Amino acid sequence: MDVIEAIKTRRSIERFKPEPPPRELIEKILEAGTWAPNHHLTEPWRFFVLTGRARERLGEVMAQALAEELPDPDSQESRAKIDAEKQRPLRAPVIIAVAASPKQDPNIVELEEVVATSAAIQNMLLAAHALGLGAKLRTGKAAYRKKVKEFFGLSDREYLLGFIYLGYPDVKPQKGFRTPFQEKTVWLEY
């Protein structure tokens, strides 16, 4: 698939078939992530692949972390939120959690490490699309909760940037739309 075509046709997939893609395809996606540009070649990304029951365990941790934040976790409304949070990781047969692990070096800018890991995520999303798989990047409060970060063994100085939900699409992708680049671009001439 042509890279420009892949960029323009990749869409986030909302529903996945239950069967997981083969490990070989997941490994190709992970490898694509490792080819992201990164200043000083620090390779700050870390990938965690969850399949099967590991997704259930993540859901339990996400639900516990949410419950700790709610003022009345035993209320009917809170229980519904907690149950929904617990089910989130089960929406796709594979989840790749992606973290940025900034190098401790005075010459390394931490934000550049996060940017490099974000580029790795984009590579992975495009690779999944080119391989005929569906993917969706999910971020949100769960990625920032301490208990969830601890589940992955991440320290306070590391960032859990999000979860790539991955599998075979069970829905036709929607047509995309973007604001024309002309409306977002300023040309500076010297």
Image (cartoon, rainbow, N blue to C red):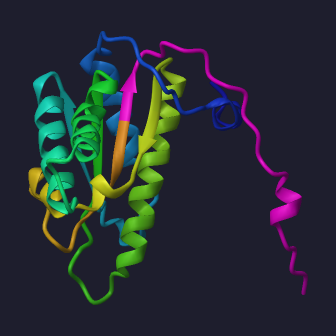
| Residue under the image location 16 percent in, 72 percent down | 156
Query: Is residue 176 located in the magenta-colored stretch of the structure?
Result: yes
Q: Is residue 36 visible?
A: no
Query: Residue 174's image quarter?
Result: top right
Q: Is residue 161 visible?
A: yes
Query: Is residue 90 located in the magenta-colored stretch of the structure?
Result: no
| Residue under the image location 36 percent in, 69 percent down | 113
Query: Residue 105's image quarter?
Result: bottom left
| Residue under the image location 20 percent in, 62 percent down | 71
x then y, percent, for residue 39: 42, 70
From the viewer's perspective, is 150 left or right of 111?
A: left
In this orientation, which residue lies closer to the viewer: 77 or 21? 77
From the viewer's perspective, is 91 left or right of 8?
A: left
x then y, percent, for residue 12: 54, 33
Residue 68 vs 131, above or below: the answer is: below
Q: Residue furthest front?
A: 75
Q: Which residues are magenta?
A: 165-190
From the viewer's perspective, is 96 left or right of 150?
A: right
